[in-house]
Amino acid sequence: MYRILKNNSLSYNKIFHIFTPSLIASLGIGVVTSLLLFVPPYKGVADNGDFFRVAYSNGLYYLPHYDSNYFGYFVRQYGLLNYYNENGSTYFSSQSLFIQLSIMLNRLFFSSHIFDIRFQAVIYVLLLMIGIYLLVESLTCMATNVLSGYFVAGLTVFIFGDSAYTEYFNSLYSESTMYVSFIFIAAFSLLLYRNRYNNLLLVILYTVSAVIFVTLKQQNAPLSLIFALFGMSFCMINKNRFFRWTVVFLMLVILGSGVMTYHFISDEFNNINQYQALTRGVLLNSKDPEQSLQSLGINKQYALLRESIYYQQYSTVGVNSNELRKGLYDHYNFVSISIYYIKNLDQFVDLLNTAAVHWFDVRPMAMGNFERSSGYAFGAHTSFFSGYNTIRKLIAPGRFGFIVVFGLLVSGCYLFSFIQAYRQKKKRLFIRFFLILTFLLLGTAATMMSIIGDGDADLSKHLLLFPITFDCMITMFLSDLITKHVFKNHGIVNRKQDRTRRREMQENLPSTPVLEDL
Amino acid sequence: MKRYKSLLLFLVASTLVFQFITPEYTQAGTLNHKKVLVVYDGLSFHTAHSDNVAYIVRQLTSMGRQVTLTDLAHYKSKTVNEFDNIVYIVNTENNNNLSGKFENDLIQYKGHFFQIGGSLISKYSNLLRLRTQVASGTTRMSVHDQELEQILRGSDTRYISDGKGTLLGRVSMNGQKTGSIGILNEHNHIGYMANLTNNLSLKLLVADLLKKWLSIKGQGAAYLTLTDITPFSNFKVIRYVAKELYDRGIPFIAVAQPVFSHLKSDAMLRYLNVLNELQSRNGALFIGSPVVYKTDVNDNQLLQRQMDAFINTLADHHIAPLGISSQNYWLFDRQYRKQGLGFFSAVINTENDAHLYWRDKTETALVKETQLFSLPFQQVVSLNLPEWAQLDLPMNTALTYSITHFKTMSSIKQFLKEIDTYPITINDFMRNDLETKSSRHHIEQKNGEIFIDGAPINHDILKQIELKKQKIQKKKSQKQIIFARQNRFLILLFSSVLVLFIVFLLISRRYYKRKYLKD
């Protein structure tokens, strides 16, 4: 839907109507991602040891000589278990849905003995294309200038098509699911803001995406609260009682999924996080580790574990041993560590700054991107379509204060449109401002929770939510800047009139503007 | 002359006669007597036989034998000819599915043969004139002619009802003598054990049989071994137990876990103090193998570097590690042998964990100069030997007791009482000649004395390793002070500007309303 250009014919408008910026963006990202994942040399992310539980609980097993590829080479093919799988119920995650779907496709079109991970990549690429289509649609459907819409489309492809994100599609990491589901969450929220499609449908789809996101892994479980809180703002869209109660119910579903995720998390995961929260968190920057341990009521001898990680190749005691359980894990938890950090703010800020340095380390530098057969060196990385990631890393200040300043700036800019909407009593338009606040809260919460919950271990994986939320904010901000809607709200789409207009266009009748101008 | 002639004739005749009656099985002069081939049909997970293969391998390596392990499926033709001794383990009752290659090779085989479980191969069964039967339900068994009543529960028990040779391990059912469990032929070259399950008496019996079969002389020595000593253990308890054992004149081995980081920290120094005291209380110190979590074959010999650093740290503080305690599978792995076991001449051979982290697997185990078989002390005590009996173990054994069991004073006292009263002789490990080599130190034990780089160690327990108190110096560099002040100044500046801005906004809003919103 675009304003009719003064000097353009109807057929010209029709071209723009068919090849909309959202379609162009979707196709563009499809092409870019396909080149990365499906054209030799294939690219993906190598296993760092985390694939084991995902693979075996989904009926996959490692083929011979797999061990020699750890860290250095990504493995494209896995064996398919065809008999009883005793590891079947050890891993609870929404990621399994996508893996099982890809296994089904694999069995249908390829083989019932060997699984090619590209089938999973196909599913993610298709989902990404749909997500980007919806996202760009929400950003550009009221563009005053056609070209600005296409510019936004190009920007979106440049940001979200970056190979640092999409190379995860050829791996068993949960980052791929996280990425795709978050794009859908952002897209559905903005579509609700724009009244682009049926409200109830969008809320349901938002809930489904949020549940998939939350049930992906343990660290996402607390974020269900933020998603649910933001989702409650959808009640303002429609005064209809049924609609409002449905929204409340769906937000409770999101909360419930968070609780369920916690409940189903295995002891091993709890132990991993608990162990590293101490050894790579509390003890890491402490000036007196023994004193820090004593303040938590722990034997000061455990200072020897400082800087160690859970997956240490050789260790003094087993990390799952009774000795550590009784002497260490039983003495502290998330709450006591949070209290410790409140009392030792300087240490916490140091860790936050350490995290800030890794905010934009989307591509894990320790893992290679190529297959062994491609001839590339062990641990080699691809530089295909990774301009945005490179620029972002270069210009990022690497301090936690950056997000505070950035957040104030962006939210300050959107505050004007929020006040405007408040004065006009158009509650739907609050959603954009709340969305910005939600992004900021998610990014900050993810950073803080990863520090409190796991220290500085695996930061690039735990902090993936930060660059995604940051990129969503940047995309929104830049597209609103281009379309001149930073300080004022977009028009709300009048869907009835839009349907009339489309029909008129098809019948080659002069079309009428459908904007509900502000 | 006639007398001499008849004497000569007699001698010649007897020589000829003896040629025909020499036993069929002779020790091969050219082959290594210490090599044993162990062949098994399957591992039988989750059954009473699941531990058999691992146990026998551990037994044989503890007896100083170089074991080569293979299963029937991977058995290569003519392999038996390279070995003097073959042990065949049958874990499934129906062992008619012998590998054709193995069966054919056995027909021609002239070396020593021992079978455990299943029906004895017909060639040897005929030689021993063996008859076996199967007893159902509960059976009571006694071994070594001692009434070590062990009740074999569960599935059917195969036993020997008759045979030509030495019968061992009486089996009786409901008080009636019915047969035996083990048999060795006259010259101990053929052996058979009808049944082996996860039962200590059976395990000791098979050890005894194997020892006789391998012609190993002498009784095994038992060593009390305290395990699971870590830097996180209760040091008071360890010190107390060590003192009590010392006062009672009971020598022991202490297995301490290695530490690979922060080797100069206070926590490490406290740990070293405890190890020093254990050594001073007549304890022989062994290093426990580290807990392995994953296999990264590109780790640049990490294990070797870490173990070397730890041994050097111990030796720097006059603590002498005399050996290592490791899982049995390390002996079968080339990398663990080199990077972990290569420092030591003594090994305590423990059971394998459920999950094994292979790096470079081989079929043949390493043989060390001193190898001890590990057996939990509590299992041995559970044999309930009568007071007049004396338990003699067939091989050198480390009777292990984890210090994590010392939860209360009563548990410690119970342990000490058991040590005092149980009819087993605890030997002193210090009498063995041992050697440990690291990159910087050479540790030896000779004639009861320990030497580090040629100098005897000091057993004075009062000489504690001095803790280096690391005082936290709150030194702030000049640069930090300037930046801290600069930060405060900037924060103050920005806050005041913000406040001013808000004030201006409020004032201007009032004027704006007054001017433009006049109605």
Image (cartoon, coloured by chain):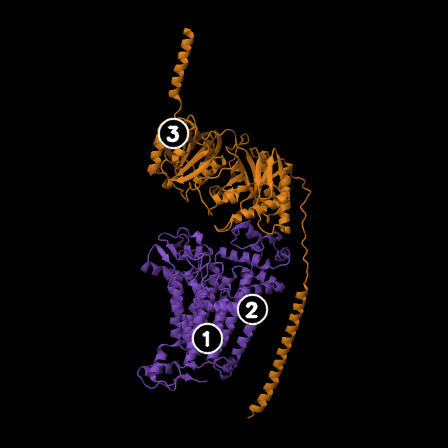
Q: Residue A450: x and y, percent?
A: 53, 63
Find chain A in the image and tell me its colour. Answer: purple
The answer to the question of whether label 1 and label 3 lie on touching residues, with beta carbons closer than 8 A, is no
Image mark 2: chain: A
Residue under the point 52% across and 56% down: A272
Q: Secondary structure at mark 3?
A: loop
Which residue is tagged 3?
B110
Residue A398 horizontal/vertical position (percent): 56, 67
Q: Give the chain letter at badge 1.
A: A
Q: Amino acid at mark 3?
A: Lys
Q: Nearer the viewer, mark 2 or mark 3?
A: 2
Is B397 rendered above or below residue A341? Answer: above
According to the picture, the residue beneath numbered tag 2 turns out to be: A397
Foreground disc of the pair 1, 3: 3
Q: CA distance from mark 1 to mark 3?
A: 87 Å
Kindly identify which numbered label has been placed on residue A348.
Answer: none
Residue A423, how many percent across, how many down? 51, 83
Q: Is residue B51 above or below residue A181?
A: above
The residue to which callout 1 is attached is A234
